[in-house]
Amino acid sequence: MSGFVIVGAGQAGACAASTMRKVGYSGKITLIGEEPDIPYERPPLSKGVLMGTESPESSSIFDRDFYREKNIDLLTSTSVQAIDVDHQRVDMGSAGSLSYSKLLISTGLRARKLDVPGGDLGGVYYLRSTVDTSVLSEALQQKGHLVVIGGGYLGLEVASSARKMGWKVTVLARGDRLLSKLPSREISGFVHDLHSRNGVEVRFNAGIKALNGNGYVKSVTLEDGEVVPADAVFVGVGGIPNIEIGVEAGLEIEGGIRVNQYGETNVPNIYAAGDVTSHYNPWARQYLQPESWQVAQNQSEIVARNMCGERVSYEEVPWFWTDQFGCNIQTTGLPLDSDDAYYRGEAGSESFTAFYFRKSQLVGAVAFNAGMDIRIAQKLIEKGIQVDPHEVSDTATNLRSLLKR
Amino acid sequence: MRNIALIKSGDLEPGEVTKVEVDGLPAIAVYNLDGEFFATDDLCTHGDASMAEGFIDDNDIVCPFHGGTFDIRTGEANGSPCLHNLKAYRVLVEDGIVMIRLDE
């Protein structure tokens, strides 16, 4: 009996399976994941779970019983080797094969490896899975100097966690600012300030030449020849979409698996959702590869509904959050290449929001400890409501009231 | 059973939420939904966030940290990543004072 097969049991896969049942699909659902765990959320892995303040189990999306109750066949520790497009089957190697009427690929990302001499030494850590987190967490039980390679979200979150666990931390950023996805150098500067205040040293334009040590890493050599001592190294240099089975099946690739706003690939009955996709967003009028919780959660829900016969377009305004040193930083919209920021609250203080305009149209916002502003900005952008820069930056304006226009 | 006064009903506009500190209890978020008052614990069950800094979307409060949602009327967690319900209180309004009733 064939039914729906979901390859990849992370946030997107689990959310899709649950949605299929929610909208009344009663056929067979098989959710296949390579990891031994039941599906879990990844955001806590670099924060509470890493520091030991949250249990790994607490990040499970649903408990084990949920899959039984919903009659979802969850195959853990199982990898799909290939898709036979002509016969609509997936090959799971020694675990056999399964036919599908519709297939969802939600295989997500894997950590990009640092390709330098010494990259495979002991004491060099990556983070993607619960196993990675427990290995790193164990290593951080001793104290020392952690060198974080990468000034992106993951590197900075691990820097924050390690600092709180008593480590001296140095971040080596490849570019000339942190979080280069943020709209301006100025706003990146506030993130740098946050880390400086909390004792993290940040080095910019720090290309990596080699990792040194005899079996175990002892130092990092920069491209300019400088040697930075290290007791451990964390590498957070981005993710690579797990597209391989899609490539072999003849799916169109553009960074990730290319899908339209409905989650359809170029091959009939094959869909993709979450981090593995490069998906067309009609609001943004471009293909996006956002690597975010929001897409894993919400796009997969839409795609699952489409697999069940609906026709719903995924066109959310992008939204992203990170937690570092107790500061919740959120961004929304696509504020790159915008004009100057208009600040609501004092820029650089504990709580403030930067609004970004392009041709007097609100295109995005970044908030430090002001999540409500972001939620409202996201809705203003989504609805195309005209607002004045001076009005949103005036704290006397009730932002919520602008939504009623 | 005892009643605990939180705010004057006139001090909270419809569509707004505020945080109230009460001795011996966790902080409480008080909501005005079109003139009807509700109260829940203020601290999110997922992250370290205050509901009073959240966004009211129809009958839901959207957590300011991670966007999870709770039904203001019942405290039910109804949007990811929040899985655990917020405690919701019984609310009474008498003589313009919004109160919660504790069964103890």
Image (spheres, rainbow, N blue to C red):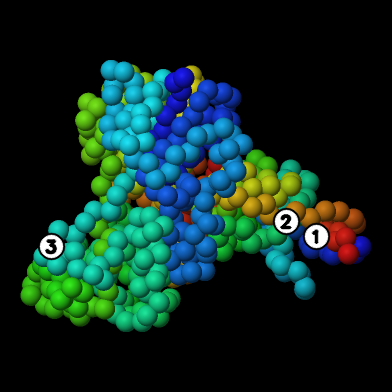
Classed neighbour count for the residue bearing mark 2: other residues with Cα under 10 Å, few (<14), some (14–19), many (≥20): some
- Residue A141 located left or right of residue B78: left
- Tag of residue A116: 3
Question: Which dot, 3 or 2, sits closer to the camera?
Answer: 3
- Residue B68 located left or right of residue A209: right
Secondary element type, mark 3: loop
Q: Which residue is mark 1?
A: B8
Residue at the spot 35% in from the left edge and 29% down from the top edge: A97
Image vertical order of residue B27 relative to residue A382, above or below: below
Q: CA distance from mark 1 to mark 2?
A: 22 Å
Residue at the spot 71% in from the left edge and 67% down from the top edge: B26
Corner quadrant of residue A219 = bottom left
Residue at the spot 22% in from the left edge and 35% down from the top edge: A254
Amino acid found under the numbered disc labelled 2? Lys
Q: Chain of mark 2?
A: B
Sequence order check, earlier mark of 1 and 2: 1
Amino acid found under the numbered disc labelled 1? Lys
Q: Chain of mark 1?
A: B
Residue A342: percent from left, percent from top: 40, 56
